[in-house]
Image: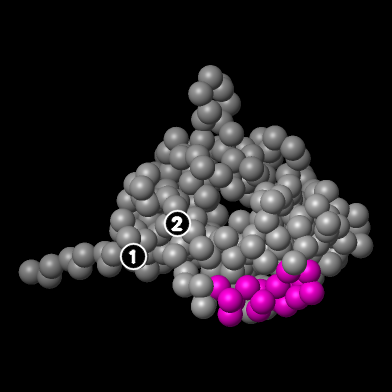
Amino acid sequence: MILLDNVVKYYPGDKEPALDHVSLSIKPKEFVFLVGKSGAGKSTLIKMLTREEKPTSGKIMVGGIDYDYLKKRHIPHLRRRLGVVFQDYKLLPNRTVHENVAFALEIVGVSNSEIKRTVPKVLELVGLADKGHKFPAELSGGERQRVAIARSMARQPKILIADEPTGNLDPETSWGIVRLLEEINNFGTTILITTHDEQIVNQLRKRVITIRNGKMIGDQKNDGHYDLDAIRTRIVKRPLATAKHTAPTADEIRRATNSRPITAQGAVRPTPRRRVI
């Protein structure tokens, strides 16, 4: 599960927040589009989830991890639980396709024998079984994005975040990438995609969350459309005084989501039980 509760983010020197009291929850196995104009706050929200940035206030929980307990030394363990795909691929240019995917496993200490078994499987999943010996410069844009997806899936994350994964691709190639993400979602992985591609959003009819000026103004949970004004599903915010009394407490959220703090070894530490007197 992904959960944000009343998240606010100010960058130093800014008078207006990049995120303004954003609250949302994404269930396991959902497929969600996050849309909005450039500067709306989409990238900031993604950086909150990957812990590149910390919120000014509010609560974040991802995959059972309560970010209130997340120390700096634990962040690499968090990111190993998430698959992240970027618009510019971020591949290692001097390594082959096979080596790029293998590297994601090497850095977390996976054995060589397990790497040899896993890499061919994920390359086959993304349709690149015959491209393992190629270097990124020898691939098309769509193929590079597939390598990036393979690398992100090598550790079998429960959540895959794709930040404008089709931004540099032509329409036909873009559809191939989106269909691949749909297939991964069908295997049980939660998918969150930021995009400006109106055609893809409108044809897939998935859940669509709309951000404008740092505020979440729409959440079309079913049959979603690309609607930057969110006219169909405008959200009415409660006054802060009311929200203060009705918003769930941290303990209530943890109990509802079964979340617990992450340990230094990357494992999850159970939340202590309350004593009953």
Q: Nearer the viewer, residue 246 or 40?
A: 40
| 276 drawn magenta | no
Q: Exactly how many numbered labels are in the figure?
A: 2
Q: Give the residue pinned by disc 2.
A: 78
Quarter of the image holding residue 64? bottom left
| Magenta extent | 115-132
Q: Position of residue 152 (x, y in %)?
A: 61, 62
| Kind of residue sitting beneath label 1 | Val
* Residue 238 seen anywhere in this rendered image of the structure: no
Q: Position of residue 88 (x, y in %)?
A: 73, 47
Q: Is residue 87 above or below residue 269?
A: above
Q: Position of residue 201 (x, y in %)?
A: 80, 59
Q: Residue at x 71, y 63 (%)?
A: 97
Q: Residues within 10 Å of mark 2 (few under 14, many from 20)?
A: many
Q: Nearer the viewer, residue 193 or 100?
A: 100
Say whether residue 48 is left or right of residue 262. Answer: right
Q: Residues within 10 Å of mark 1 (few under 14, many from 20)?
A: some
Q: Give the residue pinned by disc 1.
A: 268
* Residue 111 seen anywhere in this rendered image of the structure: yes
Given contact means CB atoms under 8 Å apart, are the residues at marks 2 and 1 in contact?
no
Sequence order check: which comes first, mark 2 or mark 1? Answer: 2
Quarter of the image holding residue 261? bottom left
